[in-house]
Image: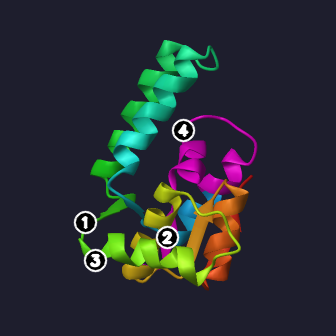
Amino acid sequence: MSAYTDTSAQSKCYIRKPRSQDVVDWADAEGPVATWRLTLVKFRCLLARRRRAGQIEPPLERSGLTEFDRDLQARNWLITPESAGLYHEARQFIDLIPEIALHTLDALHLAHARHYGARDFATADRNQEKAARALGFNTHLFY
């Protein structure tokens, strides 16, 4: 694996937002891109939250989820396996980069990416990008 994405960037492949096409182009160029299993739940929650807020209509919610699931089955997204050691690694990031207010799930995304050998890390979260850069990743900010 050479590339990893968090949910914030990955979701732009299914919901038209600023920089959506940039994420699609990046992911296509990288080949299969890895992500953490929790993304399955986070992406579903993101779609439902946007529908409830009136930002997307139910048909877009359903089609986005269908397309996401199709891409998972086609292995366009690779799901990294769980490992108990990743939680310890994520916890250590708090001390490695104390100047960055690292959130729990962001730290776990970074631990997965690092543990499984990603060189590139994509996100739409500025703080996450700053943390990834501090940990030595080539970062791609799709804000």
Answer left or right for 83 relative to 65.
left
Q: Which residue is mark 2?
A: 110
Front position in the image: 134 or 18: 134
Q: Position of residue 37 (x, y in %)?
A: 32, 55
Q: CA distance from mark 3 to mark 2?
A: 13 Å
Q: Is residue 91 above or below residue 24?
A: below
On the image, which quarter does residue 15 sit in? Answer: top right
Q: Nearer the viewer, mark 4 or mark 1?
A: 1
Quadrant of the snapshot with the N terminus = bottom left
User: Three-letter amino acid code at disc 3?
Assistant: Gly
Which residue appears at 63% of the width and 55% of the height? 23
Disc nearest the viewer among 3 and 4: 3
Spatial CA span between label 3 and label 4:
32 Å
* Residue occupied by mark 4: 14
Q: Quadrant for residue 89, please give it.
A: bottom left
Whole-percent x, y for residue 42 in the image: 43, 42
CB of mark 1 within 8 Å of CB of mark 3?
Answer: no
Mark 1 vs 2, N-terminal side: 1
Callout 2 environment at 10 Å: few (<14), some (14 to 19), or many (20+)? many
